[in-house]
Amino acid sequence: MAEDTPVFAPLALTAQGEGDFLAARQGLEQQLIAAGKKGSAAETDALLDMAELHLAWMMRPEAAGYLAALDPEVLAEDYKRRHRTLTLALDLLQDEAAEKDALGQAVSRSVGWAQGQALRAAAFARLDATEEAARLLPATVDSLDALSPAMVAALLPDLLEAALTAENWEVAQALAARFPDHAELRDGPAYRFLLARASELAGDYLMAFDGYAEAARGRDAYAHRARLALVRMGRETETMPLADAVAVLKTARWAWSGDTAAREGVVLLAKLAEELGDRDTALWALEHMTKDATPEEAKELQERARAIYGAFYQAGSEGQIDLADFLEGHARIAPRWRFDPGFAAHAAGLPQRLLDTGMTALAAREFRALRELAEAGVRPGGPKTDLELVSTLRRGEVRALLAGGQADAAVDLLSGYADGKGLDDGAEALLIEALAQAGRSDELASLRVRAQDMGLRRSRAVALYETGKWNAARLAFLEMWETHPEQFSFADATRLILAAYEVGDGETLARAALAFPTLADLPGWDEIAAGLGAQPDERVPPGQDLMRLSMQNADRILDAVTKVTDVKQSK
């Protein structure tokens, strides 16, 4: 052991920790009362004695409180050394999980402190600095005699684990022999766990299993570690089925939380649940792990979760999952993962399946919920809003509204985007359909179609025709004819003729009849010509006979023209 330097003061921890705590405390309280003047030597002695007494009994917050009552900068040198040494002892007893940086600094400040060799070795062990801990182990056993029983009991588990990791069996045996001297350690989870660990390292798995099982009955961190060790060893030796391992970890997650051992359990649970295909458990574990993960770790965890719930929504949208189970699984996934950047895109398969099933109201509601998520404000540093996804979800919601007979609601949803900033070709076509279904022919007539797509222009023109807006329909078909003459079909021409007839536009009638002389070559022209009052071989404008055509015959003729046109195009 190294010799104490003038930097550290000797502490009477053994004597303080073996006496009558209540009597000693009462005596020191009397000294504090009798000290009188604040800052006097008597008061300083009493406060330092109080701190040392509480440290010896491992009442660390109380010890720290008494030290905080003193200002070390104004103390005499002897008092300052003692204050520094007591503070160092408290710092070396910190939990690594909560105060890793502070613990590392305390270890650095304790170089040369002979009385604190065991404290230093245990601190290295908590920092996972196994080589440094192993180097100090030979002097550790003897240095324990300079500490109080309560402090020794607090250090023994860390020291024995360090000895096992370093495979220093001599020191490990000496340390294990001290456990029965302490009631709080005797046959406790820490003792059972560490003995089981020694058996596992020695290759005696049966003995290790019994030891871990015994330790797992406790309620502290070592009991939790024992449960994890049972699972790990069972999987490594292929003696524990995967389902049983997941079941053990699912139960253990509620038994212990808040430290490194708890996180280790959640990590293992996520891995094994993924392997088993336990979707809900794996997603719970991944979501739990993201709470204290670094940005890089969180990104990886989110990608893993996205793959899991993405596969679920894919299977559900393809009908591989019963609809009731699909909805139930969605209800469990959405609360935890709805704000994940990839959630809305994957979950879009659910409302689409609802729509395909005929559950239009529920489909519209789910489409709306996902659309609002996709439109929500972007988090700082997060991905930009996916405008294409928003548009897709909006179109899905409109289709659901139209299928459910809510044409006015569909119009209201789309009209807010009719300024050219958010309405794509597909949504524009839906708007035309919605206006037609809602009977809002005036709005349909005044709607300016921006897209150059012939199908979209035709949809608007047909909708105007079918709602009886003859002049607007005539103008729409003429515009189509002028813009896309090569795509202007016989059905378009027929509607144009009938719309022109309704408004008394003889010029358009003559022009259309002359432009489509090959009508006579089509199958079914005999019936069409008979309705028009012409002969099959006549290729002239229908004239006054067409003007006398009734709308009842016009509809029948239009159906026939549409039919034969489709037949010709299919050929």
Image (spheres, helix red, strand yellow):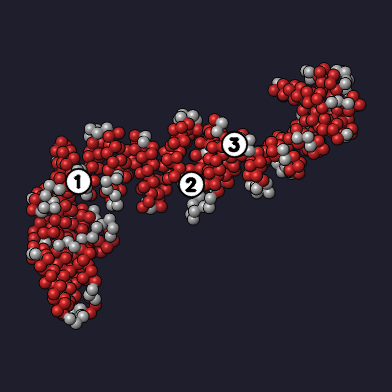
Q: Earlier in the sequence, mark 1 or mark 2?
A: 1
Location of residue 244 (image quadrant) = top left
Q: Is residue 437 left or right of residue 171?
A: right
Q: Is residue 152 left or right of residue 441?
A: left
Whether the residues at callouts 3 and 1 have beta carbons within 8 Å, the answer is no
Identity of the residue drawn at 23% across and 69% down: 65
Helix, strand or loop at disc 1? Answer: loop
Helix, strand or loop at disc 2? Answer: loop
In the picture shown, does residue 513 fall above or below 61? Answer: above
Q: CA distance from mark 1 to mark 2?
A: 41 Å
Q: Quadrant of the N terminus?
A: bottom left
Amino acid bearing label 3:
Ala
Instruction: Categorize mark 3 by other alpha carbons within 10 Å: few (<14), some (14-19), many (20+).
Output: many
The residue carrying mark 2 is: 341
Helix, strand or loop at disc 3? Answer: helix
Whether the residues at callouts 2 and 3 have beta carbons within 8 Å, the answer is no
Residue 519 x, y percent position in the rendering: 82, 23
Q: CA distance from mark 3 to mark 1?
A: 56 Å
Amino acid bearing label 1:
Gly
Location of residue 410 (image quadrant) = top right
The residue carrying mark 3 is: 400
Q: Nearer the viewer, residue 209 or 402?
A: 402
Instruction: Categorize mark 2 by other alpha carbons within 10 Å: few (<14), some (14-19), many (20+).
Output: many
Identity of the residue drawn at 30% across and 37% down: 246
The residue carrying mark 1 is: 218
Count of numbered marks: 3
In the picture shown, does residue 492 fall above or below 365? Answer: above
Identity of the residue drawn at 24% across and 33% down: 240
Residue 293 x, y percent position in the rendering: 37, 51
In the picture shown, does residue 359 fall above or below 139? Answer: above
Identity of the residue drawn at 16% across and 70% down: 50
